[in-house]
Amino acid sequence: MQAQENRLPCAIVAMGVSGCGKSTLVAHLAAQLACPAFEGDDYHAATSIAKMRAGQPLNDADRWPWLDRLGAAIGVAATDNGVAVAACSALKHSYRARLEQAAGVPLLFVLLDGERDEIAAHLAARANHYMPPSLLDSQFATLERPGPDERALALHCYRPIEDLSREVLAWARRGAIAAAR
């Protein structure tokens, strides 16, 4: 999926609840595409991180500036490089729309979906992250799976990373990029 003159810049956003493998997929895609990668967690305000660390879920007011900052960074990178990738929970339709508006380029969303218990076990084993497993239920409650009006692909999150990456790139090349025009 090399940037071509006849294609608009775009970005692929791995989305889903905490612990579903967004960052792992984004790192793999960035290596495959030789493009910039963004970790949504890096764009949270310190107050939001403190709130999550304390076991309090974020609300829309917490998320809007975060989505604007992340979207702007994605948009600059995609414009400069033709493509970029990002990890962002993007749990609601309105969050995805806000992220795309801030980016100013078409976004292709990949929902990494899985069973709550499987993801909870992964979260419990994860070290050095501010997102406590106790917030997983609030994330599942907030999650709005992408609808047919969105450029989105849903995949089971714990498939081998090579398989996930291959399927995402094939989907993007097959038509999602053309649909983003």
Image: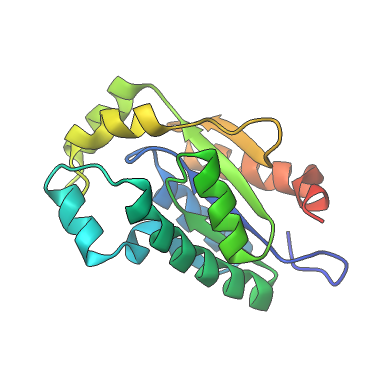
Residue 50 vertical placement versus 52 (above, below): below
Q: Does residue 65 appear to the left or right of 36 in the view shown?
A: left
Whole-percent x, y for residue 28 in the image: 50, 54
Q: Nearer the viewer, residue 53 or 92?
A: 92
Whole-percent x, y for residue 58 in the image: 28, 46
What residue lies at 77% left-to-right and 52% top-to-bottom?
180
Instruction: Work out whether residue 176 can be spotted.
Output: yes
Instruction: Work out whether residue 129 can be spotted.
Output: no
Point out the residue furthest to the bottom here. 80
What residue lies at 55% left-to-right and 59% top-to-bottom?
85
Residue 175 vertical placement versus 139 (above, below): below
Whole-percent x, y for residue 37 in the image: 49, 64
Whole-percent x, y for residue 84 in the image: 59, 64
On-image quarter of the C terminus = bottom right
Q: Nearer the viewer, residue 44 or 16?
A: 44
Corner quadrant of residue 19: top left
